[in-house]
Image (cartoon, grey):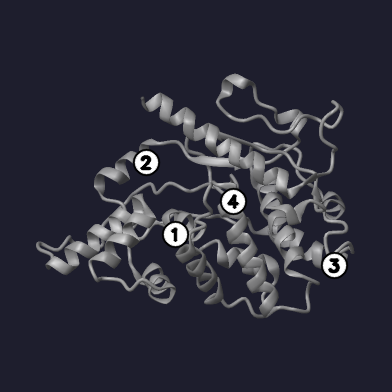
Amino acid sequence: CSRLASACVDLRVFAVMAEPRSSSDSFVYAQSPVVQRTSPLPSKLSPGEAMQEKGRKLFNSNPKKGIKLLVEEGLLENNEKEIVAWLQSTKGVKKAAIGEYIGDNEEMSLKVLRLFSDVQDFTGLSLEQALRAFLQTFRLPGEAQKIDRIMETFARRFHEQNPNIFNSADTIYVLAFSLIMLNTDLHSGQIRRKMTLEEFLRNNRGIDDGKDIDAGILTELYNAILEHEIVMEEDYDHLDDVDAHELMMQGALFTAYGDAASTSKSSTSGVASPPPSSSTNAMPKCRSVKVWIDYEKLNWQAMSDSKDSKAG
């Protein structure tokens, strides 16, 4: 994330567990009100089919172990081309598991991530359109370094196919994160004061190798997000009846971004507090996207720890 040290974005971050919410909340992993099977389960699977099913289910719970099992059983070749094809063609593979796998830092996962990005066609698309399409193929993981690797690869691919829009892939990388935050700011019911166009323009000054991006481009991006929320919906094909029932009983998980001073959580909430206000000897008002990633990681970890302690 060191490349983001010079990219400043005024932001706010917190993450909470909530009861099921309306579709107006940004980046809600929407719950399915009814999970129906379109066809009955086969009465008997062949040994190969049974092992494929076992590998798929294992992948959904532990992606690396799932791939390892399929390779060891001779059902999948251990190369990025075959793994990407399997991820894209196998029904019932969780988008969240794909995100965890392609964001990992092991050699094969890195190769898979690059090819997974390279098979995307962003030619002629705006950054908002490309980001929207990319985020429908998987679900962003919660770990900061995994997000960083995925978004870096996305930025590289977009710049390769659209080299004349921005000066560098670094610019795209920063602006893509800015769009994600804008999406949440504009569409989350938890944020009352919405980011204005003027604020969005100001937040993204100087991010194109020290130069300002054309205001017309930023205005188009802002309006596109304002008019059409980016919603990341989880797929439900992988669920059996027990899993579906459990999911429907859970609250929706979502994140929201706002002013750090107004959204700071108490230490008893189980959620990591955002950076202190700039009025207190701490961090300047202009914060880098790197800070957002770092604190988002803390939020996800705090939420996970809280959930585990309650389960225990």
Q: Is residue 73 left or right of residue 15?
A: left
The three-letter code of the residue at mark 1 reads Ile
The three-letter code of the residue at mark 4 reads Gln
Q: Which residue is mark 4?
A: 145
Task: Looking at the image, tell me whether mark 4 or mark 3 is earlier in sequence order.
Answer: 4
Task: Looking at the image, tell me whether mark 3 or mark 1 is earlier in sequence order.
Answer: 1
Q: Is residue 17 visible?
A: no
Q: Secondary structure at mark 3?
A: helix
- Residue at (83, 64) in percent of width and height: 208
Q: Which mark is residue 98?
A: 1
Task: Looking at the image, tell me whether mark 1 or mark 4 is earlier in sequence order.
Answer: 1
Q: Is residue 160 above or below residue 143?
A: below
The three-letter code of the residue at mark 3 reads Gly
- Residue at (85, 55) in percent of width and height: 201
Q: Is residue 209 visible?
A: yes
Task: Looking at the image, tell me whether mark 2 or mark 3 is earlier in sequence order.
Answer: 3
Residue lying at the far left of the rendered structure: 44
Q: Which mark is residue 19?
A: none
x and y percent of residue 170 in the render? 74, 64
Q: Secondary structure at mark 4?
A: helix
x and y percent of residue 215 in the render? 87, 64
Task: Work out which quarter of the rendered image holds the C terminus and state it.
Answer: top left
Q: Secondary structure at mark 2?
A: helix
Name the quadrant containing residue 40: bottom left
Q: Which residue is mark 3?
A: 216
Q: Which residue is mark 2?
A: 248
C-alpha distance separating marks 1 and 4: 15 Å
x and y percent of residue 289 in the render? 73, 49
